[in-house]
Image (tube, helix red, strand yellow):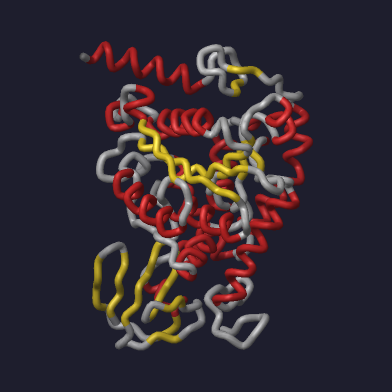
Amino acid sequence: MIIAIDGGKRRISFSGTVRGLLEHLSLSPSSVVVMREGEIVTLDESLNNDDEVVIMSVLSGG
Amino acid sequence: MRCIHCSEKAVFETPPLCKSHFSEYFERTVLRTINDFKLIRKGENLAVASSGGKDSNVLLFVLKKLGFKVTALAINEGIGGYRSLLLDSLRKFCLQQEIPLKIYDFREEYGFGTDDIAGHGGVCRRCGTLRRRLINIKAASFDVIATGHNLDDELQSLMMNIVKNNHEVAARIGPSSGVFNSQEAARYGFTRRVKPLFFLSEKEVVIYALLNRIPMINASCPYSSSSMRRHLKIPISRMEDESPGIKRRIIRGFMKISGPLKKSYGSSRPNRCVICGQPSKSRICSACRIASEIEEKLANSH
């Protein structure tokens, strides 16, 4: 799976739900929005190892 | 997960809502906040304090969509490589949305920018106070100043003010803000300050921005890394993960006690700063005190 996060991309091996991915990455679900193919995905959705996902932080830095 | 109103795929969990029902919910919440707290009256001229960030862009978009007459007021406080990015994006967004935009510059108005005062301590407090004062002055011809503060901002402010023992300031937290409440502001000729996004979380603002193609620039203020507000964001998010809806419950719970709390501090006597004429609790407002301290420090360092 390719993950785009914080302006960078990385490859990890993962299959499971969006919630599981965030747990795996130690990210708070309330602080991010996850997208696949440009569409927002909810925490219960399944992700495959060949998916490309974008994880966007919602916490402003200002 | 499916939308609770239709069979479409959900884009939001609490409650499950699809794209169109989420946008509807978001806009309804803004309108309800405006109506319940009498924030804006029909036909009033609104100045939206705009940073070029997601919150004020969303506020401009949603208020215009709801039929309000909005003008974007922005401040260039002189933070190199940060504000210029946001202001470029704001110019394009306002042009595209046909929203009038006015930009004012710290260096022209005060003679220094935020980069010039870095290293003198308390940058965020000083910069924020001076920005607020400049917006107040430039929005004097408008009926209302609307700001993009969301639920997370307000909860962070509440916790910060309690931790710092600023209970009187904490008591003023609400959809209608400023030194004076709406009625007092109107009575004494000050421009009211309102927060139509008060009950919407930062995550809801981001989802609305994504669904409506509202620009979000990924830029962080270089001075915010050490601020207490920044340190509170992650623990508050973790709290929300453990107990969905807790942020809104805390703020709503606080709103029930803030009225009596405000009264316990007595009615605020409306003063004007003797230097700038802006609302102030004391003879000289904190912005004027800060500006003169900075001018003195900069003069001594040359």
**Residue sitting at 67 percent across and 30 percent down?**
B180
Q: Nearer the viewer, residue B199 or A3?
A: B199
**Residue sitting at 78 percent across and 35 percent down?**
B260
Q: Quadrant of the N terminus of chain B?
A: bottom right
View extreme (left): residue:
B302
**Residue sitting at 37 percent across and 31 percent down?**
B123
Residue B133 image position (x, y, % from top left) = 49, 28
Q: Nearer the viewer, residue B256 or B46?
A: B46
In the image, is B82 to the left or to the right of B172? left
As displayed, is residue B132 above or below residue B88? Answer: above
Q: Quadrant of the C terminus of chain B?
A: top left
* Quarter of the figure with residue B76: top left
Tell me if residue B20 can be seen.
yes
Residue B9 image position (x, y, % from top left) = 54, 84
Q: Nearer the viewer, residue B183 or B219?
A: B183
* Quarter of the figure with residue A58: bottom left
